[in-house]
Image: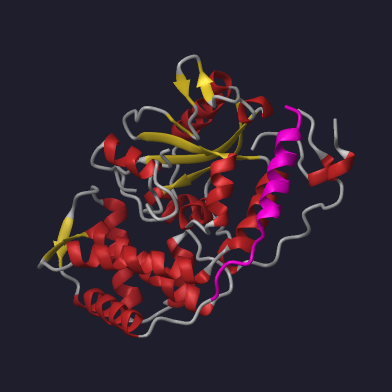
């Protein structure tokens, strides 16, 4: 594979078990608004492009990486599952005549609070050859409508699904939190280094703190109302409210988008204290128990979450929208299609 030097492209490759495949595919077809951040996605000429190479990335506090031993402990990926994901991606490339430019782990294993029986949620971005995008009737194959999602049937605990690059860039333009989290995943299966770097740069340009904050607040409020009102609470539901609440706090304090990895949110926002201690106990229980395990209400966590949600609803912060320009996305997309592979 030969890269397109003009846009800095190099050669080389790039949590919770949902109740039903139907629900996951419904989320897959949604746009920026239909999102739980671990959800299934749904669904020559070099010189002209030499004008801009991706510059060095700005320091991003959400991009810190733990030592390999701690990373594996918090984000466990079994060797046979990693091989299965890579084999699935290679099969997708052959069968669909596409190139995977970025592939990562999402869901609870990406967040860092998986149970032993949690799914493996592999998510990826891929690109077709240029003629696929130029067809008048937009067909994937004979009698097949063109789709911008590739998803394999869920097999046991392995869920592999991805978005076409054009769809991904449209979601970048909307500062879609799901895609932004993918790009900050602590577990990357494959990536085209240069294309991934440019996707990161564009995601930073289009990142909208105000949109992200309201997204995470909505996630937290919905789960809090639905699952945290009783005396017995499923362990993961606490975490499904804590994560977006801390993401909101991150957005209020930091210039960058919140990280996918839960431990980065904790280390920055709750380095110590009784709430942190209660969360650590919860994480130990979650990482050792089945997905459906419930436990007694934890007053320190329930009170903390109730107070934070009340504060955020009463006094929404003044935040900025995204700053990106559409022509930046067009330029990147056209350069990707000119790349030889």
In the image, residue 225 above or below residue 105: below
Residue pushed farthest top?
A: 142
Q: Position of residue 238 (x, y in %)?
A: 26, 64
In the image, residue 280 above or below residue 42: below
Q: In the rendered structure, does residue 327 fall within the stretch colored magenta?
A: yes
The structure residue drawn at horizontal position 34% and vertical position 28%, both measured from the top left corner, is 155
The magenta stretch spans which residues?
320-341
Q: In the rendered structure, does residue 330 fall within the stretch colored magenta?
A: yes
Left-right relation of 252 to 316: right
Q: Position of residue 1 (x, y in %)?
A: 75, 28
Q: Quadrant of residue 311?
A: bottom left
Residue pushed farthest front?
A: 136
Q: Quadrant of residue 213?
A: bottom left
Residue pushed farthest left?
A: 231
Q: Position of residue 251 (x, y in %)?
A: 49, 73
Q: Position of residue 293 (x, y in %)?
A: 18, 53
In the image, residue 230 above or below residue 44: below
Whether residue 200 is visible to the viewer of this picture, yes or no, is: yes
The structure residue drawn at horizontal position 36% and vertical position 55%, both measured from the top left corner, is 113
Left-right relation of 198 to 97: right
Whether residue 102 is visible to the viewer of this picture, yes or no, is: no
- Give the camera-side residue of 255 and 328: 328
Could you tell me which quadrant the C terminus lies in?
top right
- Give the camera-side residue of 292 and 247: 247
Left-right relation of 202 to 52: left
- Give the camera-side residue of 228 and 118: 228
The structure residue drawn at horizontal position 38% and vertical position 53%, both measured from the top left corner, is 35
In the image, residue 263 above or below residue 335: below
Left-right relation of 218 to 331: left
Q: How many marks?
A: 0
């Amino acid at each position: 594979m030969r890269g397109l030097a003009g846009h800095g492209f190099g050669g080389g490759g790039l949590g919770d078990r949902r109740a039903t495949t139907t629900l996951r595919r419904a989320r897959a077809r949604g746009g920026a608004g239909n999102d739980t951040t671990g959800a299934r996605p749904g669904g020559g000429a070099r010189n002209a492009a030499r004008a801009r190479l991706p510059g060095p990335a700005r320091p991003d506090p959400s991009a810190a990486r733990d030592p390999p031993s701690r990373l594996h402990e918090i984000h466990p990926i079994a060797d046979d599952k990693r091989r299965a994901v890579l084999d699935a991606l290679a099969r997708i490339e052959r069968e669909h005549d596409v190139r995977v430019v970025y592939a990562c782990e999402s869901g609870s294993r990406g967040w860092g609070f998986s149970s032993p029986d949690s799914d493996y949620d592999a998510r990826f971005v891929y690109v077709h050859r240029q003629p696929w995008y130029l067809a008048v009737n937009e067909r994937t194959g004979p009698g097949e409508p063109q789709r911008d999602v590739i998803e394999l049937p869920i097999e046991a605990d392995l869920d592999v699904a991805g978005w076409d690059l054009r769809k991904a860039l449209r979601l970048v333009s909307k500062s879609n939190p799901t895609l932004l989290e993918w790009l900050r995943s602590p577990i990357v299966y494959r990536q085209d280094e240069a294309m991934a770097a440019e996707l990161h740069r564009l995601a930073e340009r289009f990142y909208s703190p105000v949109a992200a904050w309201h997204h995470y607040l909505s996630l937290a409020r919905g789960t809090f109302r639905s699952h945290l009102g009783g005396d017995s609470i499923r362990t993961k539901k606490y975490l499904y409210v804590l994560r977006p609440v801390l993401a909101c706090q991150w957005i209020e304090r930091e210039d960058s988008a919140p990280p996918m990895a839960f431990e980065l949110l904790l280390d920055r926002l709750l380095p110590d204290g009784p709430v942190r201690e209660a969360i650590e106990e919860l994480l130990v229980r979650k990482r050792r128990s089945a997905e459906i395990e419930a436990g007694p209400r934890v007053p320190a966590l329930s009170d903390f979450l109730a107070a934070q949600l009340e504060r955020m609803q009463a006094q929404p912060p003044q935040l900025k929208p995204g700053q990106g320009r559409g022509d930046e996305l067009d330029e990147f997309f056209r350069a990707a299609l000119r790349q030889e592979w």
